[in-house]
């Protein structure tokens, strides 16, 4: 969003970190009438929040570890988030084959019964049992003997969810600054004095409270806050995914059970691909850009080749991505068993001093409730009540996606239908800001490749903080998988000459 280069000198709340939790808290706080500044050292969702498995889900496997509260809250949020952002969140059916299951069928079915009933499911279809040799859901599997369970969750464009929350925060008065690094903070009087740095230099900001949502860097931020006394510590777990050509027909996903009892998903991705992941690998250090290891690639390929007829090799991999999950260290021995629940660590110094809230853990599905709980913990003067439940995110103000797409196509008959569908899926009703008065594709300006026009790139720069080719091709979209050679270079040259006002 276009904002002045000047940072506010004083705010009620300083949020450090532009992942899903930081953006969600900034939105919630701004909507309660508080002045908010969010700073992110890189791009929004540039690390963990763009490296998820892209699911809004209850976390069926967490039931096995006794995380009933987390699963219930996640399931309650699932349909709520779908209603808030129906352009970037939609239902997805999952097939859970029992052909290679290390768990007995009765145990899996009991877990799915709980999954269907403890979260207030209303619109999503319930679990059904199918014969894999007869049902279309078995097509593409190497072994179609026996049965499979088919249940519901939702898909999400994870990085776009972060951006939409940041946009919503700005619409309610917050200031969001990317490429702005937090340097230090200390309590002074009844508040905080913090130092942040951007391309224009070092700035001092006074804040009534600080929220640390720096993800994998949460402990690093704590180390730069004077007299901070955290009650917990972060445990870093790397998760990696591979993108390969379509492994099976159909628009459903698979939940694959491995002999080591770990779970790997296979999910339709960007039309012509399948997403396979994730891994759980302990991480001692924080890489600036996490990368998949050879062992992780081998593990994911082995899983895919054990389940599907189609053989996949390293040479078939179109793309990989990895992220480091900042989980709360609950001392679990197995990385897969570490809690995915969030922990809010409130530090008020020696008494009722200016609050610092450190956020450990969490998952995309529960980000909205985490934000509500964070505001309850902070209990800041002048803050209004909770409001985000059911409040749509930018572009999500329509009832049915296909109906909206029909109307968009009717209003712009000269534009390619595939382009309109992609724009509607990414931006919802905000697609109309990109199209503007264009009557043809030529009216939307230079095509950087694959239908990515100047009108769209300018929208991303002005409204969504895009400042580089990677911001556009791999976070605001996944056009990097589809665009022809040279697109990245043309975008980079364009941004090198671009002079945004905010």
Image (cartoon, grey):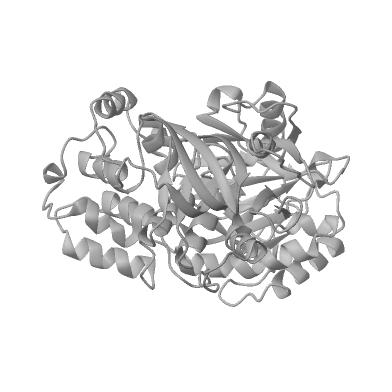
Classify residue 96 as left or right of residue 271.
right
Judged from this view, the residue extending furthest toward the front is 189
Residue 196 spot, x, y in % from top left? 49, 36
Residue 494 spot, x, y in % from top left? 25, 28
Classify residue 191 as left or right of residue 283.
left
Q: Would residue 147 be visible to someone looking at this image?
A: no
Residue 425 spot, x, y in % from top left? 37, 55
The one of 367 and 60 positioned closer to us in this rendering = 367
In the rendered image, the vertical position of residue 461 relative to residue 20, given as above or below = above
In the rendered image, the vertical position of residue 232 relative to residue 104, given as above or below = above
Quadrant location, the C terminus: top left
Residue at 69% x, 66% y is 73
Q: Would residue 281 be visible to someone looking at this image?
A: yes
The one of 284 and 266 positioned closer to us in this rendering = 284
Residue at 15% x, 39% y is 445
Q: How many marks?
A: 0
Residue 374 spot, x, y in % from top left? 63, 60
Residue at 65% x, 37% y is 216
Q: Quadrant of residue 85?
A: bottom left
The one of 135 and 435 positioned closer to us in this rendering = 435
């Amino acid at each position: 969003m276009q904002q002045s280069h000047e940072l506010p000198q004083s705010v009620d709340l300083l949020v450090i970190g532009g992942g899903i939790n930081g953006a969600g808290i900034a939105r919630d706080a701004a909507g309660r009438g508080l002045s908010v500044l969010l700073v992110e050292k890189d791009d929004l969702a540039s690390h963990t929040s763009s490296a998820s498995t892209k699911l809004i889900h209850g976390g069926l496997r967490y039931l096995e570890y006794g995380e009933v509260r987390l699963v219930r809250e996640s399931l309650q949020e699932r349909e709520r988030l779908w209603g808030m952002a129906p352009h970037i969140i939609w239902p997805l059916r999952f097939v859970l084959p029992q052909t290679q299951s290390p768990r007995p069928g009765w145990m899996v079915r009991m877990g799915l019964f709980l999954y269907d009933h403890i979260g207030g499911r209303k619109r999503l279809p319930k679990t059904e049992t199918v014969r894999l040799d007869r049902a279309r859901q078995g097509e593409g599997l190497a072994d179609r003997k026996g049965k499979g369970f088919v249940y519901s969750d939702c898909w999400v464009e994870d990085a776009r969810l972060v951006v939409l929350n940041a946009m919503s925060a700005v619409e309610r008065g917050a200031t969001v600054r990317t490429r702005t690094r937090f340097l230090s903070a200390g309590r002074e009087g009844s508040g905080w004095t913090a130092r942040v740095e951007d391309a224009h230099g070092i700035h001092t900001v006074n804040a009534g409270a600080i929220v640390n949502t720096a993800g994998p860097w949460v402990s690093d931020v704590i180390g730069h806050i004077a007299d901070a006394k955290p009650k917990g510590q972060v445990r870093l777990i790397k998760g990696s995914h591979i993108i390969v050509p379509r492994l099976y027909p159909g628009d459903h996903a698979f939940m694959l059970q491995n002999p080591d009892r770990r779970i790997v998903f296979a999910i339709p991705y960007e039309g012509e691909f399948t997403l396979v992941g994730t891994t759980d690998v302990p991480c001692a250090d924080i890489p600036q850009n996490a990368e998949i290891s050879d062992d992780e690639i081998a593990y994911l390929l082995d899983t895919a080749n054990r389940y599907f007829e189609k053989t996949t090799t390293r040479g078939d991999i179109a793309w990989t991505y990895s992220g480091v999950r900042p989980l709360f260290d609950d001392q679990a021995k197995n990385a897969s068993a570490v809690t995915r629940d969030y922990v809010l660590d409130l530090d008020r110094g020696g008494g009722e001093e200016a609050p610092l809230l450190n956020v450990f853990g969490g998952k995309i599905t529960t980000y909205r409730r985490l934000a509500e709980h964070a505001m309850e913990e902070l209990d800041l003067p002048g803050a209004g009540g909770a409001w985000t439940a059911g409040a749509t995110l930018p572009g999500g103000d329509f009832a049915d996606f296909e109906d909206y797409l029909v109307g968009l196509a009717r209003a712009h008959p000269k534009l390619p239908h595939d382009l309109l569908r992609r724009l509607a899926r990414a931006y919802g009703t905000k697609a109309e800001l990109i199209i503007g008065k264009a009557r043809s594709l030529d009216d939307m300006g230079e095509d950087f490749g694959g239908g990515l026009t100047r009108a769209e790139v300018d929208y991303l720069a002005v409204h969504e903080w895009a400042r580089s080719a990677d911001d556009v091709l791999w976070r605001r979209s996944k056009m990097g998988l589809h665009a022809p050679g040279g697109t990245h270079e043309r975008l980079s040259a364009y941004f090198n000459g671009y002079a945004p006002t905010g």
